[in-house]
Amino acid sequence: MKPEDIKITDWQRIFIGDVPGGFYLEVVLRIAVIYLILMVSMRLMGKRMASQLSRSEMIAMVSLAAAIGVPLQSPDRGILAAVVIAAIVVSIQQLIAGLSTRNQKLENVMQGNITPIVEDSCLNLKMMQKTGITRERAFAQLRGNSIRHLGEVKRLYFEAGGSFTLIKNYEVVAGLPILPIWDKEYQSEISETTDEQVCDQCGNKAMGNSGNEKCNNCGNERFIAAVK
């Protein structure tokens, strides 16, 4: 379109576009066909496409979304291109899924690994930094599972798909409180302060009673009373 053809008062071009009115009737047919293409493609890619998506499935979804945009908006573009792209995307997705089930290393490369965030009531700060999970994000996830302190947690895994899996301790031990620091009144109502000391950064138990002790997990020098 030439610059002189663009006018701010050209309401027909702004709202309807430079296509004949009959094209919008054609769009109805195009949408129906492309909707069918998407439904078939999703069905062929498996049930996980209707739940939480992995990396490869998300890439497939974005590719399908990009493929359908052009034939919907451009009258000079046919639907066949969208059909071909959908077939290629589904084929690649099925190939990757098949190879991943046979090769653990490939699956780890494509999907990622499970990351332990909490191990034996102690935060794994190195893994948290590697995955970009903050203490407050981990604590918020635990609070959402009705956890009051780290002593209740055996493992907290950050799954490859972005979800969390919590495994509770069979026997609750004293641990680092995870409620907001300003909510001390409620903390005292639901938990009991013990004589044990834990690192206020990661929840690791203190090994001695010296005032200058450092946490052997994260190197922090501040310890607080654990709760149970």
Image (spheres, helix red, strand yellow):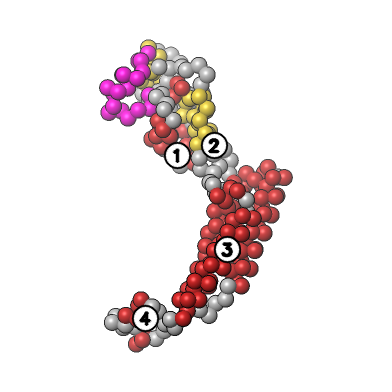
Q: Position of residue 128 (x, y in %)?
A: 47, 37
At horizontal 62% and vertical 44% (from top left) the residue drawn is: 108
Dot 3 or dot 1: first in sequence order is: 3
**What residue does disc 2 label?**
115
Q: Amino acid at mark 1?
A: Ile
Element type where label 1 sits in the image: loop
Q: Position of residue 162 (x, y in %)?
A: 51, 43
**What residue does disc 4 label?**
13
Gap between marks 1 and 4 measured at Cα = 48 Å
Q: Give the farthest residue toward the right.
A: 102
Q: Position of residue 181 (x, y in %)?
A: 30, 28
Give the residues drawn in magenta, as a range: 177-194
Query: In the figure, is residue 168 to the left or right of 134?
Result: right
Within the image, what quadrant is residue 159 found in?
Answer: top right
Q: Nearer the viewer, mark 2 or mark 3?
A: 3
At horizontal 64% and vertical 55% (from top left) the residue drawn is: 44
**What residue does disc 1 label?**
133
Q: Are marks 4 and 3 in contact (CB under 8 Å)?
A: no
Quadrant of the rendering where the C terminus is positioned: top left
Q: Are marks 3 and 1 in contact (CB under 8 Å)?
A: no
Gap between marks 2 and 3 measured at Cα = 38 Å
At horizontal 35% and vertical 19% (from top left) the residue drawn is: 190
Within the image, what quadrant is residue 102 found in?
Answer: top right
Whether residue 105 appears in this view of the structure is yes
Element type where label 4 sits in the image: helix
* Residue 142, placed above or below residue 194: below
Q: Nearer the viewer, mark 4 or mark 2?
A: 4
Q: Nearer the viewer, mark 3 or mark 1?
A: 3
Quadrant of the rendering where the N terminus is positioned: bottom left
Q: Position of residue 116 (x, y in %)?
A: 53, 33
